[in-house]
Amino acid sequence: MSTVTEHLPADDIESALASGPNGDEVNSKVPHHMVDSLHVPAERYYSREFFELEKKHLWPKVWQMAAREEEIPNPGDFVEYEIVGQSLLIVRQPDGSIKALHNACRHRATELGKGCGRFPGNQIVCPFHGWRWKTDGSISHVFGREGFDPATIDPNDIRLREAQCQTWAGMVWINMDLDAPPLMEALFPAANILERNGVQNMRAKWWKEAIINCNWKLAQEAFFEGWHVKQTHPQLYTYTGDAESEENKQNVSYTPFINGHGRFQSGDARSSYGGKADFLESARNLFKGQDAMTLERDVTIFESVAGDMDTSTPEYTQKALQALFAFWAGAGIAAPALTPEVLKMWGGDIHLFPNYLMLPMYTNCLVYRVRPYNDDPDWCRFEVWSLTTYPEGQDNGRLTLSGRYDKDDDDHWGLIPRQDFANLERMQRGIKNVSLGQTTLSSEWEVTIANMHQELDRRLAAEL
């Protein structure tokens, strides 16, 4: 599997900054456009007109994560990817490659596959009239051929149509636009940063979803910043000192990149930040509340070296991380390099435009994918993965979605996602309040939200 860094030099990452607000050449074409970087027009989150523009000019033209490779480990395995009414079959080929085929019979438009499964004998069979295609999309059998005008069943005309399909970091990415730029170019520089953190070595531990009454953009924006932690997740805000302080003690920096991507990570030390987080307590709370960025095995290692140490000191943190790297080496787990660039990303977030977020930490990663649901701008399909790095050679079998669970289901969602989900539907109701024409963004904490919207406007304007 190729890597992004084979295509683009890593030392270009820090220079790939976003250009900022758009000019009249973009804004004049887009309804409810971004006027500046400090406000988002409320209509962007519920307007049918804006939603229809996204359906027509964003989703058919953009690279999007369609599946994890573990979902289709063997030839003939398939999984369906659906976005705003368009269905594609992601199919493993006999040679191990992967294709994305539009999920519609070339005869009478019947969907050829649903959910996930396997095409026996690498043959896709239409359930209506029995036409068959090979899993590469080529026609292999037309039942009742004698009843058709030969011109209507030319093999080139009735082969299944393909979308662009490429893989990166154990994920399958698709783009319905056959003329779109290559995946590696589209993911720059976000993928380069994630590769430094070893996401290409990670595999899924679990995968589940919820249906949320919230626009897809508003839902994902909740995770573009860590500023909400003190109020939304007070159990994670373990800083010592004045608990009532209104100063944001988190030392975090935010970077908007080209292509609509964004990052937040640990920033450089500044006198305006204060307090010390309790490393061990934070790790325990992350595991209990999410079971993703921090796993039970990580907490066990941290506890084993704590002794009588003050677990909020840099000395303890260093000792805990040294023990973690020693464990990875002994267990045969591929680990990222112990560099400042890697450490800054632990507990941070990378948004890959338009709708995919990865939060790497240690050899783990919390992942979100947020899609429109049911042709309704007020609803989204919110999927969550827990990824981790397993010892080399470990086979966990075929990955399947464990289930769709209610947002308040405390048997299947930890405290952290339930706290986040509780905010999302409140935001969607509030965004329609007659007193509110726009949201207001922080010029420091929320710059990547503005960047995502500005890129969206550029994508829409390019097609109008």
Image (spheres, rainbow, N blue to C red):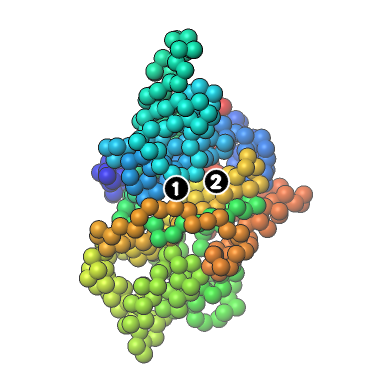
Residue 317 is left or right of residue 237, and the answer is: left
Q: Nearer the viewer, mark 2 or mark 1?
A: 2
Residue 10 is left or right of residue 176, and the answer is: left
Q: Quadrant of the C terminus?
A: top right
Reading the image, the residue beneath label 1 is: 352
Kind of residue at badge 1: Leu
Residue 216's x, y, as percent?
58, 48
Residue 348 placement: quadrant? bottom left
Q: Farthest residue toward the bottom? A: 308
Q: Residue at x 71, y 53 (%)?
A: 429
Residue 335's x, y, as percent?
27, 62
Helix, strand or loop under label 2: strand
* Depth check, front residue: 122 or 6: 122
**For the residue carrying disc 1, how many other residues have a C-alpha within 10 Å: few (<14), some (14-19), or many (20+)?**
many
Mark 2 vs mark 1, CA separation in Å? 13 Å
Camera sees residue 21: no
Residue 377 placement: quadrant? top right
* Depth check, front residue: 117 or 234: 117
Q: Residue at x 45, y 76 (%)?
A: 284
Kind of residue at badge 2: Arg
Q: Residue at x 45, y 12 (%)?
A: 146
Sequence order check, earlier mark of 2 and 1: 1
Q: Quadrant of the N terminus?
A: top left
Reading the image, the residue beneath label 2 is: 371
Residue 290 is left or right of residue 333, and the answer is: right
Residue 337's x, y, as percent?
26, 62
* Depth check, front residue: 462 or 119: 119
Residue 53 is left or right of residue 171, and the answer is: right
Q: Residue at x 34, y 63 (%)?
A: 363
